[in-house]
Amino acid sequence: MKRTGISRFLLRQAGKLALLLAASCVITFILVSHSPIDPTQAYIGADLLRVGAEQRDAIAEYWGLNDPPLQRFFFWFGSLLQGDFGTSMIHRAPVSEVIADRFLSSLVLMITAWVMSGILGFTAGVTAAMKRGSWLDRAIQWYCYTLSSTPTFWAGLLLLIVFTVWLPIFPVGLGTPAGVLAEDVTWLDRVRHMILPALTLSITGLANIALHTRAKLIDVLGSDYVLFARAKGEEGFVLFRRHGLRNILLPAITLQFASFSELFGGAVLVEQIFSYPGLGRATVEASTRGDVPLLLGIVLFSTLFVFTGNLLSELIYRWIDPRIREGQSI
Amino acid sequence: MNLRKKTLGYAIVAFVLLLLPVVLSPLLGSEQLATHLTARNEAPSWSHPFGTDWLGRDMFTRSIKGLALSLGVGLTAALASGLIAGTLGLMAATLGKAADRFISWLIDLFLSVPHLVLLLLIAFVTGGGVKGVIIAVGLTHWPSLARLIRAEILQLKSSEFVLVSRHMGRSRWWIATRHLLPHLWPQFIVGTLLLFPHAILHEAAITFLGMGLSPHQPAIGIILSESMRYLSTGMWWLAFFPGLCLLILVRSFDVLATNLYALVDPNRSQE
């Protein structure tokens, strides 16, 4: 009985995903095909004077730009279904390869920032709620509200100034040291290059989860069972571990999984500041230089990424929460 | 001084802070934006509170003008988003089940693409420029507010005073104007106000990433992305002050909206 519930849930989610991706395909294609930017022009770029009219036609013919939009859409959509995302104009490589390659380095960065912001934010929220009304609580709240109005890229710039210019602890940017062959790069180098971007992403990402956790825990602390526990003489960490932790952990985890969209957006900005060679930087390059196949691929891929986050959040909710788990099997 | 007066005080201070760049921007004139090669790369001083850049332009003037531009773009885009949100939320809650399903699905669709990617895509498609930025920011900020308004109307429709009114034979129009609107207005206005901070931050973000405004326009995003080239030489003021101004601007909007909400929300009128 339980099994059928889960499989039905997954089946429905898969249907939702297919509809979502198909709709994104249609909408993005319509948007892009009405764009005033001429892809041939964007491809030629600065070599404008050296490319003649015939060569332009040849390029347009090569990319299939002279076909009617509907034919182009079905050609593109058909290849998408076969797993072919087309060829990136900037990188001159298949889009799927570029995305896979870039996403791997982004993933390391995002996971680090995600885990750090989750743990730090949760701790900050719990501390604020347990010490409600104290200066610590006010400081944490002030920090969170200020951070949620701070532009992520400005926070990154400040960290860059402090930790690379004033105190040269970390390297200025890029994913690996400059002037070193790819085979000679150690994982320690990669970690050193990743710390600042990850730090930027996590200090701006923790505000949401901290405030949410604080509000939840204050709710829990106002309940009758906590009042009773206090009457029995429990206090401090023991009280929190026995009565608070499990009640607030679940919403915190699901919130953190549902934040993949902001995480991706933050990664775009942070990678741009630190010249980190990830998917975010590829997104910016694709949109500023008019690499349409890559941009479309990234839109679809990031949609899938956000969907995965939301799906995981729901699955974990079902798996962890005893109320829902038991309710399913009945 | 009671809490209500204090709240009003906060709201007024925030409002004045917001007006500051709008008033100062035309007063400052544009001669400070011209290049002064004798006064290049100066650290902050009394004559140049925010320092000068590599062309001798006064950073204070550039920042204030940038903030005024950000405010303009944010205002237009947030109003557009508010309008879309109001219309769609209203339609979802009143036009029956099929419309509700479709609009809810549309909201989910918009929320399922990372916001920044969507902004970049729309700004790219519209060809960039101030127009592109406004369209991108305006078209992408409505989903959360639309969802809020839809939920609010659905809740109001099933509340007791509306049910009683309906049983007493009041017309739909009467109920809509006398019962629903007074509850919805404050929600809608504060919701739209709360869109501003996001709109301004996103405007700065896509400008920073290089989509949009031309390099000659004094926008905060452009100032910050230009400053990146000069940070390694120790010119911290190029990035520090403009970003701080943006932070204060966004924070004041937040303070204004939350305090205003506390004032107009009927449920909190006793505080």
Image: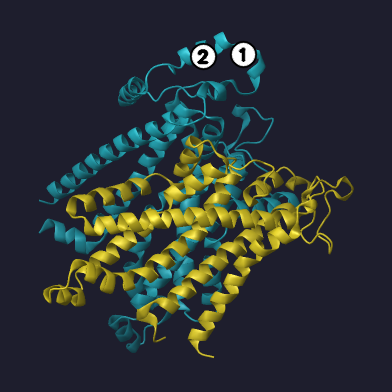
Residue that numbered label 2 is attached to: A59
| Image quadrant where residue A162 sits | bottom right
**Relative to A76, is B116 above or below?**
below
Residue at the (66%, 49%) spot, across then down: B224
Residues flagged by tags 2 and 1 on a common chain: yes
Asked if residue B48 lies left or right of residue B26, the reply is right
Q: Amino acid at mark 1?
A: Val
Asked if residue B77 lies left or right of residue B28, the reply is left
Quarter of the rendering occupied by the N terminus of chain B? bottom right
Residue that numbered label 1 is attached to: A51
Residue A134 at least partly seen: no
Asked if residue B96 lies left or right of residue A150, the reply is left
Q: Mark on residue A324?
A: none
Q: Colour of chain B?
A: yellow
What is the chain letter for disc 2? A
Task: Please provide percent x and percent y for residue B120.
Answer: 49, 41
Residue density around tag 2, few if under 14, some if 14–19, many if 20 or more, within 10 Å: some
* Disc nearer the start of the sequence (2/1): 1
Task: Please provide percent x and percent y for residue A266.
Answer: 51, 49
